[in-house]
Image (cartoon, rainbow, N blue to C red):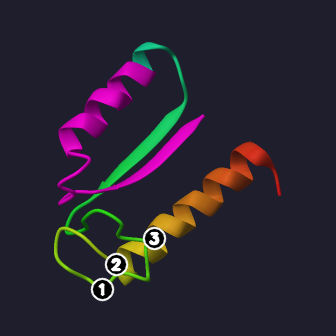
Amino acid sequence: PVMGNFGGMDPVIAPADVMKLQQVLQTAGKMNDFKVFDGAGHAFNNDTRPPMGAIGYNPAVSIEAWGRTLGWFKKYLGS
């Protein structure tokens, strides 16, 4: 299983590229769950970087993305 959290304003990993990867995984029959967060940029979970629009920390998105990640780990890796 593959899970990913991406920023909709990320200048490095474009949302269109995320969708292409998701399509490839689905075609291959691989479990996946990708989410693109509108208003978040690259490194949105890196709290050592100041918020800078398309790059940097986004506290609200980070909380949601971290919750998704922990839920995914629990589901696929156990408690």
Q: Are marks 2 and 3 in contact (CB under 8 Å)?
A: no
The residue at 25%/68% (across/down) is 40
Q: Which mark is residue 18?
A: none
The amino acid marked with disc number 2 is Tyr
Which quadrant would residue 76 be assigned to in this image? top right
Dot 3 amino acid type: Glu
Query: Which mark, residue 50?
Result: 1
Q: Nearer the viewer, residue 13 or 77?
A: 13
Q: Amino acid at mark 1?
A: Pro
Percent coordinates x, y for residue 43 in the rendering:
35, 66
Q: Does the magenta segment cover residue 17?
A: yes
The numbered mark, 1 or 2, whose residue comes first in the sequence reads: 1
Q: Is residue 55 above or below residue 21?
A: below
Q: Which residues are magenta?
A: 1-25
Mark nearer the viewer, 2 or 3: 2
The mark that comes first in sequence, 3 or 1, is: 1
Q: Please give left or right for residue 51 compared with residue 9 in the image.
A: right
Q: Earlier in the sequence, mark 2 or mark 3?
A: 2
Where residue 67 appears, as percent x and y from the top left, is 55, 68
The residue singled out by tag 2 in the image is 57
Secondary element at image label 2:
loop
Label 3 belongs to which residue? Answer: 64
What whole-number distance in Å separates the C-alpha atoms at marks 3 and 1?
18 Å
Q: Residue at x 35, y 70 (%)?
A: 44
The answer to if 13 sits in the magenta stretch is yes
Badges 1 and 2: C-beta atoms under 8 Å apart? Answer: yes
Front of the two marks 3 and 1: 1
For marks 2 and 3, give the CA distance: 13 Å
